[in-house]
């Protein structure tokens, strides 16, 4: 079973993938992935929103509980959605606690900034393991003006290094680095004692994460830094069309899919 402490052990890179339901989480776990992230990327990937901003704590809690019900050993990390943290510290801690107490998450992830250092410390103190997240933080899309690469200027890169250190000192057990230059991610990884997990952050992080839709080829679009390792969308389209054709042609259901009850002979 993967634990937040166990993530620091071993020489192999850490593998993390998102999942938003039990069957997908079971597949991810069966494949030996270390961490299942119930990301707020569910907004786009599963719930039909056009960003992560509308995702609610109830939605994350429900999806996290489903993922946690799947059998397996992977660490389950629940993403805290927009405004479920950062407004009021006590409320942030209670919301995070709910994801552990009610939804059975092992840890929470927080899109981090200067305002989340104290919150990370408080959550850690009360026993809620926190995964920090720096670089591109999609919940800040309106401030950033788009889903753009971060840390490309010297000042911004140094701020990310400082914030990474501050969150590690506050007790974060791991750090996601999203859409930042590979050399910046390498420098952060070198500077920290906690593992870094990159997405669009090059090969020098301690691990990698992708959104499941991008990794298996389920979405219609995926970001330039993602790689599709399958064509699940194509497979599903083929299967759904084959089902439609079989029903419209009368080929399905066939005899082996049906049951005739002799005792019902005299029904009419
Ligand atoms: O919500 C999410 O899936 C994430 C990952 C992309 C790191 O934050």
Image (cartoon, grey):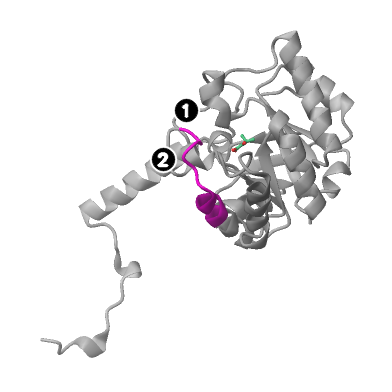
* Whether residue 163 is situated above or below residue 65 in the rendered picture: above
Q: In which quarter of the image is ligand 1?
A: top right
Secondary structure under tag 2 reads loop
Could you give the CA–CA distance between mark 2 and mark 1, rounded to whole angstroms? 13 Å
Label disc, if present, on residue 221 of the rendered structure: 1
CB of residue at label 1: within 8 Å of ligand 1?
no
Horizontal and vertical percent position of residue 104: 66, 60
Q: Given the current orientation, which residue lies at the most extreme top position?
A: 153
Q: Which of 158 and 29 is in front in this view?
A: 158
Label 1 secondary element: loop
The quadrant of the rendering that contains the C terminus is bottom left
Depth order, front residue of 171/225:
171
Q: Where is residue 173 in the image (x, y as percent from the top left)?
A: 81, 42
Find residue 244 and report its horizontal and vertical position in percent: 28, 49
Mark 2 close to ligand 1, CB under 8 Å: no
User: From this viewpoint, is residue 23 visible?
Assistant: no
Please give the name of the residue rendered at 51% of the width and 24% of the height, measured from the top-left corner: 142
Provide the residue span drawn in magenta. 51-63
The residue at which mark 2 appears reads as: 48
- In this picture, residue 249 sits left or right of residue 226: left
Which numbered mark, 2 or 1, is in the foreground of this view? 2
Q: How many numbered marks have been drawn onto this rendered protein structure?
A: 2
């Amino acid at each position: 079973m993967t634990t937040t402490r166990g993530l620091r052990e071993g020489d192999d890179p850490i593998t993390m993938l998102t999942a938003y339901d039990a069957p997908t989480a079971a597949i991810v776990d069966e494949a030996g992935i270390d961490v299942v992230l119930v990301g707020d990327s569910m907004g786009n990937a599963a719930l039909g929103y056009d960003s992560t901003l509308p995702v609610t704590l109830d939605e994350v809690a429900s999806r996290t509980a489903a993922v946690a019900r799947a059998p397996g050993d992977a660490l389950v990390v629940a993403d805290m959605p927009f405004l479920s943290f950062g407004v009021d510290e006590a409320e942030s801690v209670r919301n995070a606690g709910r994801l552990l107490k009610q939804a059975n998450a092992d840890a929470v992830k927080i899109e981090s900034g200067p305002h989340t250092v104290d919150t990370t410390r408080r959550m850690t103190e009360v026993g809620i393991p926190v995964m920090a997240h720096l670089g591109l933080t999609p919940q800040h899309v309106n401030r950033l003006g788009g889903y753009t690469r971060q840390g490309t200027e010297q000042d911004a890169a140094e701020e990310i290094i400082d914030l990474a250190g501050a969150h590690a000192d506050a007790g974060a057990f791991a750090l996601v680095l999203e859409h930042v230059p590979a050399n910046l991610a390498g420098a952060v990884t070198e500077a920290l004692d906690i593992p870094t997990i990159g997405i669009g952050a090059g090969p020098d992080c301690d691990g990698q994460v992708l959104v499941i839709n991008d990794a298996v080829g389920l979405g219609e679009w995926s970001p330039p830094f993602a790689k599709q390792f399958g064509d699940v969308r194509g497979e599903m389209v083929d299967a759904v069309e084959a089902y439609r054709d079989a029903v419209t042609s009368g080929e399905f259901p066939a005899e082996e899919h049906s049951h005739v009850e002799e005792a019902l002979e005299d029904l009419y």
